[in-house]
Image (tube, rainbow, N blue to C red):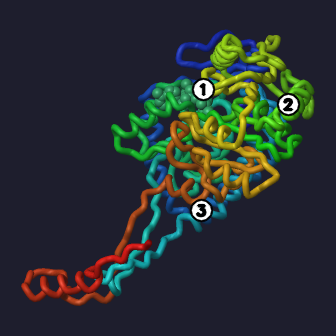
């Protein structure tokens, strides 16, 4: 039986099933409340054994070389395209997202990433010849090579089960590592299915494994692997960083965000309003780089608010079904509803006005209405803490300086956007934002530039995915110096003599002895 059939069978057997047995986690469809499967809640010993198997499998995988590994990636891409409906169905059922989000932001991304890393890994990880400046190294060859860490652990969140979990495994695998992935306990099914698929597409057994379970399972993974990549909340990311520091293993962290959008007076207000609604409400706002707050210059504020309200009222929300049925799906993670309600209550208590939405939707699934707020300020959680819901608070500002000051008044720094038809001015403002990423007259699309590093500053994370840093992080850099034609003895060798000391002193004076001239 294929991996896909197994997963489907599990799901069918589990429908209407009693609560999870001990050692099992029930997986629920957030849009219907129905239990759609069960997965093991793996104990530390099981994770240890998995990592041990991954360690034994890694050398053969590394020995396959870039071409051998690229073949598997391209085979996998073919599999995804052939089996797109089943993958989309499973993503929609375990996450509650729309089919369109599953298609574009997950499947499309992963197919693109498989081809991208298959092609680019040899370039990003090629030996780098270093031309050294040192006179003492004349005639010697220096180069850096990138070798895989061994076993990489990837821990992922529930908002993008494919993109932000399996997506991070692709460069790790292409670099020659074995990978053990711990998906969120809320959305483990798609990744679990892939454990078999990767093997069927040609990877040796145990090169890619999936450890299902809750937080402790993730903790056990950090205790065993050679490098950890984590995507999730800042709170858990901090714990992972501490555990990695204890073991002195490298950690790459993609954490939360409170991304600002700035709309300047000369902006194309229609485009800005469409972008704000799209990227605040998409996937029910459960995107680390969602537009979480907007600052609009006074002259275009009323116009912007009016357009945002009109667009938001047009959105259709509900359980995802056939393509094009709804724009906004369910809230994936139960506790998220309380966080949104808390932020809304706090804002309303402090004087905010709710122009659209503001309430939990009707069941049986979990929904929160697309919501627009004005009259907000930075005393409110809705402007300072990650809400992670379909909620768009809009604040009026006097000028660009005030917008920048408020945008930077945050402990996060993931993505950001500026809207202005004066592109040079937009770029100037973007450069002043304390964020790992910024878009001008756009939002979020920078994530698709797989050649460009994407990482957060401040409490949004450490390290980056994409670009050369996005694969080199899965390797240890080894610097190698080669002397091809070396004399038996070099001037820097023993014995120390007064003559040699004088000669080096003279060389030093010759090179650096002149007093520097100050530039006026
Ligand atoms: P969490 O931090 O709650 O969980 C992330 C993962 O870590 C889950 O698999 C979780 O397991 C696991 N985990 C929990 N405790 C531990 C532990 N002690 N040691 C190791 N692993 C542990 O995040 P969410 O799943 O709630 O994801 C939402 C967050 O992710 C948001 O803050 C969002 O901004 C961020 N995010 C960031 C992205 C980025 O690129 N910067 C992209 C996407 C999301 P379990 O679920 O089983 O508890």
Mark 2 vs 1, N-terminal side: 2
* Picture disc at residue 121: 3
Mark 3 vs 1, N-terminal side: 3
Between circles 2 and 1, the one closer to the viewer is 2
Q: Is residue 262 visible?
A: yes
In the picture shown, does residue 400 fall above or below 341? below
SS for tag 3?
Answer: helix
Give the class, few, some or many, for how many residues have Cα within 10 Å of label 2's Cα (few <14, many ≥20): few
Q: Quarter holding the C terminus?
A: bottom left
Q: Is residue 435 left or right of residue 305?
A: left
Between circles 2 and 3, the one closer to the viewer is 2
Disc 3: residue Cβ within 8 A of ligand 1's nearest atom: no
Quarter of the image holding residue 163?
top right
Pointer 1 residue: 385
Give the class, few, some or many, for how many residues have Cα within 10 Å of label 3's Cα (few <14, many ≥20): many
Residue visible at 77% across and 56% down?
Answer: 423
| Numbered-mark total | 3
Residue 222 position in % (x across, y down) = 44, 36
Disc 2: residue Cβ within 8 A of ligand 1's nearest atom: no
Quarter of the image holding residue 508?
bottom left
Q: In 3D space, how far apart are the residues under numbered discs 2 and 1 (Cα atoms)?
A: 25 Å
């Amino acid at each position: 039986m294929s991996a896909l059939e197994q997963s489907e069978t599990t799901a069918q057997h589990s429908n209407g099933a009693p609560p999870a047995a001990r050692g099992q986690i029930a997986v629920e469809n957030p849009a219907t409340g129905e239990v759609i499967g069960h997965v093991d809640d793996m104990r530390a010993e099981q994770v240890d054994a998995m990592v041990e198997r991954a360690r034994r499998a890694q050398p053969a995988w590394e020995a396959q070389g870039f071409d051998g590994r690229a073949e598997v990636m391209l085979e996998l891409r073919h599999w995804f395209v052939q089996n797109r409906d089943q993958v989309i169905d499973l993503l929609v059922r375990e996450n509650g997202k729309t089919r369109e989000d599953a298609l574009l932001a997950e499947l499309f991304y992963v197919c693109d990433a498989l081809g991208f890393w298959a092609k680019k890994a040899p370039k990003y990880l090629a030996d780098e010849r270093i031309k050294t400046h040192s006179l003492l190294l004349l005639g010697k060859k220096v180069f850096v090579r990138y070798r895989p860490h061994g076993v990489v652990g990837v821990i992922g969140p529930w908002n993008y089960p494919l993109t932000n979990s399996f997506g991070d495994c692709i460069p790790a695998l292409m670099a020659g590592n074995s990978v053990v992935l711990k998906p969120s306990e809320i959305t483990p099914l798609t990744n679990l299915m892939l454990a078999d698929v990767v093997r069927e597409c040609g990877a040796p057994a145990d090169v890619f494994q999936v450890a299902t379970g809750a937080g402790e399972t993730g903790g056990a993974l950090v205790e065993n692997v050679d490098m950890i990549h984590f995507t999730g909340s800042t709170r858990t990311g901090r714990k992972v960083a501490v555990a990695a520091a204890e073991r002195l293993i490298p950690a790459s962290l993609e954490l939360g965000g409170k991304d600002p959008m700035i709309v300047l007076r000369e902006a194309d207000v229609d485009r800005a309003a469409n972008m704000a609604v799209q990227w605040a409400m998409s996937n029910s706002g459960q995107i680390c780089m969602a537009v979480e707050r907007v600052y609009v210059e006074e002259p275009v504020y009323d116009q912007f608010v009016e357009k945002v309200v009109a667009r938001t009222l047009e959105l259709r929300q509900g359980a995802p079904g056939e393509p094009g049925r709804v724009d906004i799906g369910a809230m994936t993670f139960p506790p998220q509803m309380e966080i949104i309600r808390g932020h809304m209550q706090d804002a309303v208590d402090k004087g905010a006005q709710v122009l659209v939405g503001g309430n939990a939707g009707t069941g049986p699934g979990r929904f929160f209405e697309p919501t627009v707020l004005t009259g907000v300020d930075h005393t409110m959680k809705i402007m300072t803490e990650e809400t992670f819901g379909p909620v768009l608070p809009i604040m009026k500002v006097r000028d660009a300086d005030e917008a920048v000051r408020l945008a930077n008044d945050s402990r996060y720094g993931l993505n950001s956007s500026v809207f202005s038809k004066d592109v040079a001015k937009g770029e100037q403002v973007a450069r002043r934002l304390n964020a790992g990423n910024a878009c001008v007259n756009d939002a979020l699309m920078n994530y698709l530039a797989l050649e460009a590093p994407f990482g957060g500053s401040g409490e949004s994370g450490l390290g980056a995915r994409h670009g050369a840093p996005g694969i080199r992080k899965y390797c240890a850099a080894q610097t190698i110096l080669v002397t091809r034609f070396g004399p038996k003895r070099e001037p820097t060798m023993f014995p120390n003599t007064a003559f040699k000391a004088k000669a080096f002193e003279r060389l030093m004076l010759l090179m650096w002895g002149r007093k520097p001239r100050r530039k006026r």
